[in-house]
Amino acid sequence: MNKPKKNKKPKSAKAKKTFAPGKQANSKKSKKLVVFYSRTGITRKVANAIAQELQAELEELVDKKSRKGIMGWLSGGRDAMKKILTELEPLEKDLSEYEIIVIGTPIWAGNMAPAARTFLSQNRGKLKKVAFFHTRGGSGLEKVEKELWQALSATAASATVAAKSLALLRREVVKDLHADKVKEFAKQLIG
Ligand SMILES: Cc1cc2nc3c(=O)[nH]c(=O)nc-3n(C[C@H](O)[C@H](O)[C@H](O)COP(=O)(O)O)c2cc1C
């Protein structure tokens, strides 16, 4: 005689919730935004990689003050060092829709670029969870980290920091060696 079949639960009901980095939908509940400034495309390249990994949307900060050429380099370095704010083009996204906002900046004179500082300053209180990433030529990592934390607590005190900052060197990004670090960073944010 055949044994009576056990009333098995359908597989899907038993399935464990698995962590699938990068595969999560940008649902209303967990919408993520990558906000970044980039003068020469390095930080933009990292922003795109992070957004892809997190299934996040992107907002590029546009500095109304020209940072092109040697004059732009000089004014950028000076403004960054003196922590002078700049004027930004209006944002396209409504920040209140996003649960996590990842902010990216190149390092200028050991500081965040004025566009990133201005973004933080103008959006005081609107950020829930934040994380930073930055790219640099090579110098002053410790100063940079300290500077980011100070800027965050001065301008966005109500925000919580969702991950350790992702720090990348320009040459790593140029050679496409940033993928593993980006994945690890994303895992901290959505894992
Ligand atoms: C005005 C200026 C100042 C900079 N100061 C620093 C610095 O203090 N330390 C550093 O490591 N890199 C510095 N850099 C290099 C940039 O941080 C680096 O090239 C960065 O990856 C550029 O990113 P972007 O292409 O997104 O603009 C500076 C670049 C500029 C334009």
Image (spheres, helix red, strand yellow):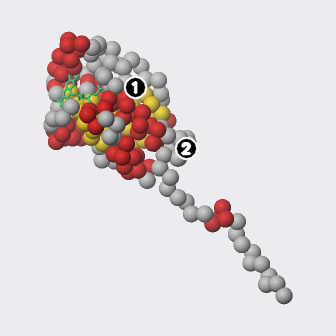
Marks 2 and 1, how far apart in space?
A: 21 Å
Give the quarter the ligand 1 occupies.
top left
Horizontal relation, residue 83 to residue 61: left or right: left
Q: Is residue 162 visible?
A: no
Asked whether 66 or 87 is in front, the reply is 66
Residue 87 at x, y percent in the picture: 31, 17
Q: Who's the residue at 48% across and 46% down the image?
A: 22
Which residue of the protein is positioned furthest toward the front in this rendering?
175
Asked whether 52 or 32 is in front, the reply is 52
> In terms of secondary structure, where does tag 2 sit?
loop
* Amino acid on which the number 2 mark rests in the picture: Ala
Residue 127 at x, y percent in the picture: 39, 37
Horizontal relation, residue 81 to residue 179: left or right: left
Do tag 2 and tag 1 residues touch (Cβ < 8 Å)? no
Q: Who's the residue at 18% across and 22% down the image?
A: 77
Asked whether 65 or 11 is in front, the reply is 11
Residue 111 at x, y percent in the picture: 20, 31
Residues packed near mark 1 inside 10 Å, few (<14), some (14 to 19) or many (20 plus): some
Q: Is residue 74 visible?
A: yes
Residue 179 sits in quarter:
top left
Residue labelled with disc 2: 25
> In terms of secondary structure, where does tag 1 sit?
strand
Q: Is residue 64 above or below residue 114?
A: above
Instruction: Please identify the quadrant where the N terminus is shown.
Output: bottom right
Q: Is residue 162 above or below residue 135?
A: below
Residue labelled with disc 1: 60
* Amino acid on which the number 1 mark rests in the picture: Glu
Residue 103 sits in quarter:
top left
Q: Who's the residue at 20% across and 13% down the image?
A: 70
Residues packed near mark 2 inside 10 Å, few (<14), some (14 to 19) or many (20 plus): few
